[in-house]
Amino acid sequence: MVISSPLPKAASRAVRVGALAAAAATASAGVAFGYGLAQTTRFVLREESLALLPPGSESIKVLHISDIHMVPRQELKRRWLHSLADLKPDFVVNTGDNLGHPKGLDPLLEALGPLMAFPGAFVPGSNCYFAPRPKNPLRYLANRADTPRNSPKHQLPWEQMHRGFGAGGWINLTNRNHSLAVRGTRLDLTGVDDPHLGLERFAGWPAGSSTSSAAPHLRIALTHAPYQRVLDAFTAADTDLVLAGHTHGGQVCLPGYGALVTNCDLPTWRASGLNRWDFQDKSTELNVSAGIGTSRFAPVRIACPPEAVLLTLTARG
């Protein structure tokens, strides 16, 4: 018969210390998750001002929303989206990833109903087409911007969503362009399908008349994912302003450092905010929204609150 001997005292202490360390790490992870979960509903409005309009133009308020990832019963998100209508924007831009659940369409359209009282335009993201699925978070933190593998069984009701947006008066800029007047200024708009899925096809600018380029106007380009190839193409085409989403602002940021990833080839210091994009001898203003929601399988935000962006466009001096 073999009788097991007790662990030596030193080994026993090591086991206890290891167990305590593991418990502390688990508790810390739980606290971090709880904090990150709470931050997903700490909605903020970021306000920016840009002097881009032709001299003498009236100011235009553009509300930029992105990455709603709507899931049923997200009451706080619904109420906050409703409240954005109080800003009375002149134009609303939606840069995709609207759905987070196969049953998210009706809650989404209800939440956006008050905003569809205003003129707007939209482009889709991958989570307009396909539902999110569980992923290894370490794969995301490695910043692997590989193309999602999707199938018809994960398809979302994007066609009905586009019809709903269209019924509300919003312009579909999926590989299309359009021109309209807002507060006396002609806005030339162009947009692309989601570059994260490799679906983008730049349609250029509205043709207009032979003298349209000489008339006062502003060129605005929309994309969901701000891949460098898309930003370069927009910049080369003399875009004045690019609006994008997709990055979630990094979603997990370190204070004093910023975003760890962007989920595309955009540098992490550009993960959210307003800055300039340069290509060859041209440049354009670029606004990347940190977005409003998250995947329901990764419902946390750390040092990166959900946001909408109100851009006030003013006349150049």
Image (spheres, grey):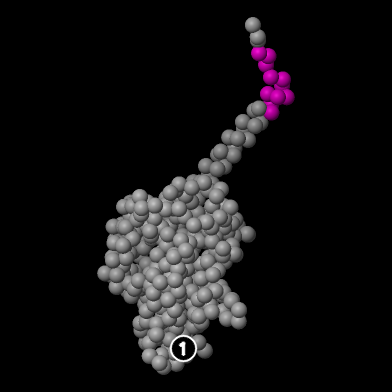
Number of residues whose C-alpha sits closer than 10 Å to that of mark 1, classed few (under 14), some (14–19) or many (20 or more)? some
Q: Quick check: 30 above or below 286?
A: above
User: Mark 1: which amino acid?
Assistant: Pro
Q: Which of 164 and 149 is in front in this view?
A: 149
Disc 1 marks which residue?
Answer: 54
Identify the residue at image location x=67%, y=16%.
Answer: 6
Local secondary structure at mark 1: loop
Q: Is residue 5 magenta?
A: yes
Residue 123 makes an appearance in the image: yes
Q: Position of residue 216 (x, y in %)?
A: 43, 90
What residue is shown at x 54% (from left), y 52% (from top)?
140
Determine whether, in the image, residue 133 is placed left or right of residue 11. left
| Residue 70 makes an appearance in the image | no
Residue drawn at 42 percent across, 76 percent down: 203
Residue 256: image quadrant is: bottom right
Q: Residue 71: where, in percent of width, then height?
A: 36, 53
Query: What stretch of residues is rendered in magenta?
Result: 4-14
Assign the N terminus to one quadrant of the image.
Answer: top right
At x 41%, y 58%, the residue is: 127
